[in-house]
Amino acid sequence: MIQPQLNEHNKQEYPPMHTCEHIVNRTMINLFGCGRSVSAHIERKKSKLNYLLEACPSETDVKRLEDAVNSVIARALPVTMEYITQEEAKGRFDLERLPEGASDAVRIVKVGDYDECLCAGIHVNNTSEIGQFKIISHDWDENTKQWRIRFKLI
């Protein structure tokens, strides 16, 4: 099988942290009914994600998020890729985040049966390679209705 030619990716993520970002995004959707993060800064030592929410999550919500993400990681899910055309992706994925001039072929990254999204980044092969997810801080911006979490993997 010939691998489709994709646009070059502009950054080199730390695979465990980047794969964890996918799990956090799906968990936020599941728990809070929000969209995927509106802003992300993913690094090896610590990362941060911003979400648009109606209200600031409680400390109980923070613990629930942490526990849910770690539960998914513990399932040792395979992380796989699939290539489709942008036309095939319409209605299934948010194409608004694709860069201008993106190739017709797009890559879907799947975390077992838990999450799938368009992504050109680098990932682990299995969630068992991630480690434990730990929220180290979080804050709320009432003006923008954004919740920022800072996390690390231990």
Image: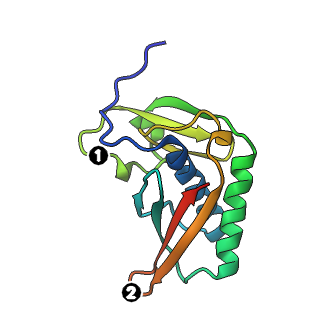
Percent of width and height locating residue 147: 49, 75
Is residue 92 among the parts visible in the rendering? no
Marking on residue 85: none
Classify mark 2: residues with Cα within 10 Å, few (<14), some (14-19) or many (20+): few
Instruction: Name which residue type carries label 2.
Output: Asn
1 or 2: tag closer to the N-terminus: 1
Label 1 – label 2 distance at C-alpha: 28 Å
Q: Quadrant of residue 64?
A: bottom right
- Relative to 125, say whether 20 is above or below: below
Tell me which residue sits at (62%, 70%) in the image. 32
Q: Quadrant of residue 2?
A: top left
Residue 4 horizontal side relative to residue 83, left or right: left
Q: Which residue is mark 1?
A: 99
Percent of width and height locating residue 77: 70, 39
Percent of width and height locating residue 141: 43, 83
Viewer-side residue, 110 vs 46: 46
Instruction: Name which residue type carries label 1.
Output: Pro
Assign a secondary structure to mark 2.
Answer: loop
In the rendered image, the residue lying farthest to the bottom is: 142
